[in-house]
Image (spheres, rainbow, N blue to C red):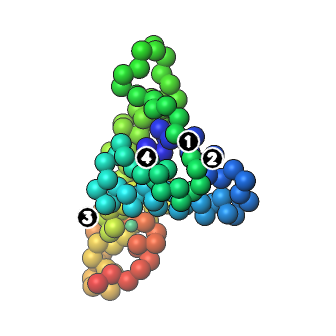
Amino acid sequence: MIWQHDDIVPQIVSKSSAVKAREKVKDFYLAIIEKLTQGVDKKNVMKEIIAEKTFGSLKMKSRVNTSETQSKTFSRETKAAAFIRDALPKVQRCKICSGYLHSNSISIDHKTRKEDGGLGNLDNAQLTHPYCNSTIKN
Ligand SMILES: [Zn+2]
């Protein structure tokens, strides 16, 4: 969705200072997540956000349909969509919070805590976020 509407963010941040722009982009992404969580259909999320005018008046470019293109070359959107489709399911998830892990930021956690007798063997190791690993488990 973010790739399909990559023209929206520049509209939101135009005329904003860098600090303000960052807040606005964050609010925009949160608004998208909020709509999706409420069960709004993917096709209508952006329409609703634009209609609410929270981010000023925005214009949506004509939709790029990635599956019904007549062109023989891949568009930037299609390339991005292909990458996300193929790469995302293979991304490791944190075993504590189930969120996606970034390869630069992985912690190896003891499944059974050391305090509870957990050993440093492979069976007792799991990939987690450093943050999730550092917080106290129940
Ligand atoms: Zn986590």
Q: Position of residue 94 (x, y in %)?
A: 36, 62
Question: Whole-Å distance between the Cαs marked 3 and 1?
Answer: 53 Å
The residue beneath circle 2 is: 11
- Figure check: 103 above or below 116: above
For the point 48% across and 45% down, the residue is: 2
The disc at residue 107 is none
The answer to which of marks 4 and 1 sits earlier in the sequence is 4
Please, what is the three-letter code of the amino acid marked with disc 4?
Lys
Q: Is residue 63 above or below residue 96?
A: above
Residue 59 seen in the figure: yes
Residue, disc 3: 123
Q: Amino acid at mark 3?
A: Asp
Tag in front: 3 or 4: 4
Q: Quadrant of residue 126?
A: bottom left
* Residue 50 or residue 6, whichever sits in front: 50
Q: Position of residue 123 (x, y in %)?
A: 25, 64
**Numbered badge on residue 47:** 4
